[in-house]
Each structure stands twice: as C-alpha cells, then as structure tokens.
Amino acid sequence: MTNSLFSAENQSTPVECFGQTFPSEHARREHFTKLLAEKLKDPAFRKIEGFPQGTDEAILAMSDPPYYTACPNPFLEDFVRHYGKPYDPSAKYSREPQTIDVSVGKTDPLYKAHSYHTKVPHLAIVPSILHYTEPGDIVLDGFGGSGMTGVAAQWCGSAPSAYRHELETEWKKQGKAAPKWGARRVILNDLSPAATFIAANYNLPFDVETFAKEGKRLLNEVEQELGWMYETLHTDGKTKARIEYTVWSQVYSCPECAGEVNFTEEALDEDSKRVKDEFPCPHCGTTLTKSRLERLYTTKVDPSAGNSIKVPKRAAALIVYLIGKSRYEKKPTVDDLSIIDRIEALPLQSMVPTIEIPPMHMTHERARMDYVGITHIHHFFLPRAAQAMGVLWAKARAHPDPRIRAFLLFFVEQAIWGMSVLARYAPTHFSQVNQYLNGVYYVASQHAECSPWYILEGKLGRLAKTFQAFGARQAGAGITTGSVACLPLASGSIDYIFTDPPFGENIYYADLNFLVESWHRVTTDAQPEAIVDRFKKKGLPEYQHLMQRCFTEYYRVLKPGRWMTVVFSNSKASVWNAIQVALQQAGFVVAEVTALDKVQGSYRQVTSATAVKQDLVISAYKPNGGLEDRFNRDGPTVDSAWDFVQTHLKQLPAVKVTSGYPQELLNIVERDPRRIYDRMASWFIRHGTMVPISTPEFLAELPVRFREMDGMVFLPDQLVEYEKARSRIPQVKQAELFVSDERSAIDWLTNFLLKRPSTRSEIHPEYIPQIGSAKRKGEIIPELDQLLEDNFLRYEGAGDVPSQIHSYLSTNHKDLRGLEKNSPALVAKAKDRWYVPDPNKAQDLEKKREKALLKEFEAYRSFTGRKIKESRLEVLRAGFRAAWAAKDYQTIIGIANKLPEETLQEDEKLLTLYDLALTRTEDGV
C-alpha cells in the first residue's frame, strides 16, 4: 500500500493533518503525542466519564493521536471542524428510512480479519451510509466495537466496480437513484480500549508490505527462540517434527474407588471423536458419566508470586504434529513430558500480565474461574503458552515503527484467547484454532494447547492479502475511547449515526475484554457500561437510563432533520421497550422498525413487542429545528399536533415493495392512524406536556386533513406516488398481527371485520387461535363478546344494511348483487353481523369506552394488596394517561410499584409514563 500516509516510505515526506503541515509522519505523531501526554497530566481530563484505567505510558503506547486515542480523544472537535460542514437549516435534505440486512458480509475476509464478540458486517452498513449521506459527510458510531462502521464509510469510496454495479442495479429495481460514491469521514467511540484498538487498526492506513515482512520475521524469531518447546520426535524415534497442538485432559476422581480418571483417555470415543455418554472406570469398572466425576486438584508454585496455588489436575493426552505437510498424532512420550517439565521451571515472561481478576459477573457468577484455578490473568495460560505469548507480545511491542508496531499487536492479540485454557479440544473440527466458546469464560475438560505458528502463520498471509486489497487508503477516522454519554463533539455536528449498542445482558463486553486489555495494560471503566448486570447491581431500569443518556448525547450531536439507524439484537420484549422509551425520551422519533427474516431473507415490519425474535433495524430521526421552534413558540396546541403529523409523514416511505416475485406492496405500519397518534402523543409527553387532542378526535380529523388509502395515511404527493405503485402492483401485503394484549386484539378484529363483516359465530373460530403463546403473562384480555360490544357495531336488522356489510355481501354472494340496502334477502343475510363503525360513530364509542376504562381503573387505585397479579392493560394505560394529564404522578408511581415487573417493562406506553412520572417527582415538579 505505497500510497499510505503511514507507510515507511513516507516517514520523510511532508504530511498534512487538520490543516497543519508536518515535515514527516514521525513529526506529526510526535507533535500530537506530546499534546496528548500533557493532556493526560490534567486531573480533570482523567475524570471524564468512561476514562479507561491505565498509566499515561500505557495509554500513549496504544494511541496514535490525533486519529486514535485509547482515552477520550481531545482532538475530535478539530477533526470535525476540519472535515465537517456546519449545519445549514436552508440546505435541502430529505430521506426515507433505509433497511439493512445484518447477515450480509459475514464471510467477507475484511469482516473476518479480527474477531470481536459481535459486530454488524461493513457490507451491511454501506447501503445505509450511501443512502443517508453525501461524500465527505461525517458518520458517528458511539458503540463502535471493532470499527465496522468506519470500514463501511471508507468502503463507500473504495468499493470495487463489481460491488458498485450490483448495488446500483438493486437500487434501480427499487426505483432509487444511483448512490453518490465517495468516502465518508467517521467518528468511532467505544468504552473498551480493546475495541477501539481493533477499530483503529481497521481504519487507519499502514504499509501492508512492511507488516507482512515484519510479521514473518517475528514468527521466525519466536521459532529460533522457542522452537525447542514445540519439538517432538516422530514415532520412528528419529525424525524431528513441529507440534501443532497438544491435547490436555482434565483428570478426575472416580466417586466409587477414588481412582484417577483421565477424561480424554476414558471418555473420548476414538472412532467417532465424540465424548461418550457413559464409560467405565479404568480401575473398578463402575459406569461413569461426566456429571458423576469429581475434579482433582494439584498444588503448584505460581511463577509470578512464588506462592503455592491449587490448580485443576491436567495431563497431556495427545500430541498432533507436522512432518512436511503430513499430520500425525501420538501419545506424549517421556521426552515430551520432560520438555514440559523443563518449561514449567522457567520464570514467567515479563510481558505476561499478572494482575488479579477483579470481581465481575463473567468470572465470579456466570463461570467460577477460581474453581478452575484462575484468579489472575497469567493463570489463563499453561506454562508453554505463557512463554510463547510473552515473547510474541514483547517482540511485536518492540518494533520501532509505531504504525507497524500497532498492527503487529493487532495480529498477535488474536492468539490470546486461542492460546489460553479457554480453547477447547474439538476433535470433530478440521482446525483447533480459536475453539473457545464465544461470549463466555469457559474452561472445558479437554484443552487444545496450540502452537503460535499453528494459530498465526495462516492468519498473517490472510491479513496481508485482505488489507492490500481493501485496507484504508487515508486517515478518514477519528477514534475515541470513553462513554457515549459524553462525546467530545459540538452540538449539531454529525450528519448520520449508525449504531449497534449493547442490548440488556446479551454480552458482557467489559468482562470479556478484560483478558485482552490486560495485555495492553489499559482496561475498561465498566461503571458507565450500558448493560443489565446483577453482579454490578444494574437492572433493566438502570440499563434504560444509561441508554437514555447515550441516546440523548446522540440527539445533541446529530444535525436537525438527520437520521440514526439502530440495530437491535435481543429477543426480550422488556429490553425492546426500554430501548424504545430511551429513544423517545432522548427526542428521537421512530419512523420505521423492520425485522430481518434470516430464513426467507426478507423484511417484515414489527407490529408487536412479541414479534421481537430476530434482528431489528430501527430508523429514527431528529425532528428538524423548525418543528421544535414552532412548538417552543406556540406550545402544546391542536395545531402543533397536526404540525408534528405533517412533519412526521414527510419522513415516512411512500412505497415499500417486497423483494420476492411476484412483488407485493407492503402495508407501512408507521402510516397506520393509531401508530401515528402514538408517535405524536409520545412526542408531546416527552416535552412534558399534555397531549392536546384525544384519540377519537384525532382519528376522526386525520382523514379530513390528510389522504387515506389501504388503511394508511399519506400527504397528497405521497399518495400520488403510492397510487402509481398500486396501479403497477395491485397486491398489498398486510402486516402480520400478533394478539398479545387488548389493543392488538382490537386491531386484529378491526382488520378481520373490515375484510369480512361477520356474525359472532363466524368470528369466534378465527379469533380464538390468535390468543395463544403470544399472550402476555398476567394480562387480562376481555372476552370476545365484550371486545365486540365495546369497539364495534352490530347490524340488528332494522333500517338499511350498512354500506360496509352491503359491499362485502354483494361482492361475495352472486344472489345478493344489485339488491337495495333494505331488500329483505339482504337484510336477512346481514342481520347480526359485526362491522367497523365509521369515524363519527367510532368517536362516540371511544369516549364511552374510555369512561368505562377509567371507572375500572379505580379498582387498581384502591387496591390494598402487595401485588396486582393480573391486570387489564388498556385500563392501566387509560388510568396512567389520565393521571399524567392531571399531574398526579404519585398515582402512576404507586400503581406501577404494585404491578409485576414484566407488566411495566413489556409495555412501552406504561413504561414511558412511569419513567416520566419518576423524573418529575425527582425534579420536584
């Protein structure tokens, strides 16, 4: 990569950085490193939330300022000032929500260049960046992880022609204009120094040829120094061979005779290479299972502290080695065991971290590491692996060129997990490289102790090839380490946000990154980590408030009228609602939520929290400044409600088409009248005001002010676009409805009756199967008869047959076509059919229903027991709304405290009002 600003060839070439010119890359780095070193001495700087734990020297060693710092980056505002464009309210900007396929690109070599606990592939992000931004715009990812958003931003300018052609063809099919190709600038943040170090090496250019050469030299030097540790003799007793990996077996005790049981020798089936369910004790013949075995321990001298420690007893059971290109295996000989004993007597390499593992969920609650003899970081490694990792790290760290040094460490650190005792022996797999369990510290009964060359030789070639073809060509990224809740950025400076935040307790990032970060000597400050972690006393409410702070900061730095894409990967409805409430409280308005169906490879819009079973893509926007200014000027009026609706409808797609054949128009859930009302109501509540218009009034007025078609609301120009698509694609695919509560039951019945006005006996067999596993625990859904009586109208046979029923019957029954609405035959067929009332009558029904709900709410208000085990959600919603309007926050809080946790957490509307009531009470409002 000879055009790299960071190449060895450019060390004496003038370089430009943020408008300053330096005589060389070395001078640039020296200048900003000195500034960072001075900044690190400032106690106030080190008190910034999320500041990692590490010495000045360790932080400086990881960093490459001004582009990357392993602490909050003090140069980011300069980055934005130099590359960004100030917000211009007169500049035209309009986009519709863009969906992404988060499963795309997971086999791409760039994606696989460095593993991380979870990440969205860059090829899944590229279309969104192209859609929402222009070349040169600044993209932000505050939960940047391994930096895939940065890779995607740069890929927009370096994508190969084949990819460009494929994407442009797809967009043309969708009726979209071709994207504007060109790199975007990116700012990446993460709480974890391990993550930002990976992100920096993915996104900052380096001399690939020099890295490849130095990587080979590093492995050769390790071979010369430690090769003897991985030598073994072939079974002929003469030919020397290199060990690829040694299988270590846990040694247990038989519960009957107390004899030692080598797990691999006794439990592993030699033919199938699988662990047997049952096997005999080699001493007494008792039938054993793994669960019956008792772990044996042995006492050893800790090579770091010199004290005695208890560790699980292990035995080398198998050696797999190479001669030329042929692979062989054998049981360890006396000579092999002698080499292992010799290694064990060596002092620990100075580069191996020996720090004690602090109390954390992953090592003290989820998996008791002390039970497997691990209380300090160096205990993760057997003696030979510790020697190898120590030498690898020391040699990589000693390289004189800072950029090559960083990428050598990026290369070497990928062996940390794979050379630790976390690497399981997986005999049915082709390779034993990195056979550890993802997302957990777990020490198995069989461990594959791999040689450094077995893990890294192939990796070196793949990295060089991948980054030669696709690596960063310019320093287009600013990377910072700290909390998303306090980004060192100016307000309204970011053009687009793409983010994949942590969800609930899916992954314990700080815990899992501690192993790698210990080698860098810079570790995560886990205090502000957004996570559900019982060990750290962080429940769902704490998680929600942390996420709300993060989204509030996102809202602050994003330009008005611009978009944020949030990828959601959690199956819990409670976490989903926490995210939605956090988004709304921060000020964002959700315009679309789509779920990726990985089986069918298609998207479906989410209509219920119970549908949260797959990866979701949330498209949200920051309302433009005009809407906020008008609200601040005029207050919560009916006109401001319609102002919001007008603005919101502009952000919604006019047409959505399925990807399959034949094509179908998708029903756009966000254009549903009730969903629009919910978005409007949430916006007013978030501003701390009453909703200025009731649901029935809103639903009656909506079709007067706007256009309706196929149950969706449009602006006039959007309806023209939809009608054009409707004439071309006549089939409209309705969104799938799930009956999980009273509101969704009413929605299902409305959909059903709009298509088929029916009698109670016709409705019942269709409706009952819908109330199954989706029904929430503790939720009372009224009987079908009550739902029909409260929300719909029944034709009793008096007067003309209602138009809705007449239309249905005349369409589906030939003998009823052309009859007058008072025809006896038509009346007889129509009698007792339920139908959806027209808006004016619906208003009266809704008011009557609201009154009944509030009357029933009084029973909850006067409830004197400890917990309300079963409740009717619509009653609670109506009561909470009325209490909010009356500023009766104590009623909301009091009843919320009596509800089961899941009732509150799994309903977005209740959770929003409860959260706001708490805030108002705490603020003394």
Image: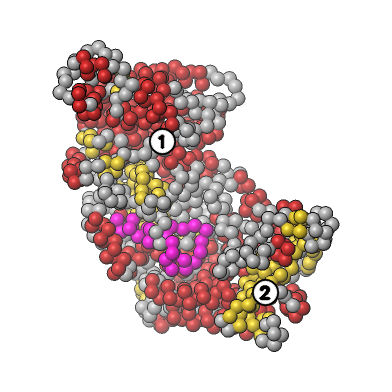
What residue occupies the far right of the structure in this picture? Answer: 257
Label 2 SS: strand
Picture quadrant of residue 219: bottom right
Q: Which residue range is magenta in the image?
A: 106-131
Q: Earlier in the sequence, mark 2 or mark 1?
A: 2
Q: Position of residue 31 (x, y in %)?
A: 45, 72
Residue at the image point whose x is 82% and y is 62% from the top: 283
Q: Is residue 125 magenta?
A: yes
Disc 2 crowd rating (10 Å Cα; few below 14, some 14-19, many 20+) is many
Proximity of marks 2 and 1: CB atoms separated by less than 8 Å: no
Left or right: 666 with respect to 311? left
Q: Position of residue 589 (x, y in %)?
A: 35, 42
The residue nearer to you, when weighing 871 against 546, is 871
Left or right: 286 with respect to 603? right
Left or right: 38 with respect to 842? right
The residue nearer to you, when weighing 605 against 733, is 733
User: Which amino acid type is marked by label 1?
Assistant: Phe
User: Which amino acid type is marked by label 2?
Assistant: Ile
Residue at the image point whose x is 54% and y is 52% from the top: 507
Residue at the image point whose x is 32% and y is 31% from the top: 751
Left or right: 144 with respect to 648? right
Q: Position of residue 778 (x, y in %)?
A: 53, 29
Picture disc at residue 319: 2
Q: Is residue 186 visible?
A: no
Q: Is residue 494 magenta?
A: no
Label 1 SS: loop
The residue nearer to you, when weighing 887 against 175, is 175
Residue at the image point whose x is 56% and y is 58% from the top: 438
Picture quadrant of residue 636: top left
Q: Position of residue 390 (x, y in %)?
A: 64, 73
Which residue is label 1 attached to?
738
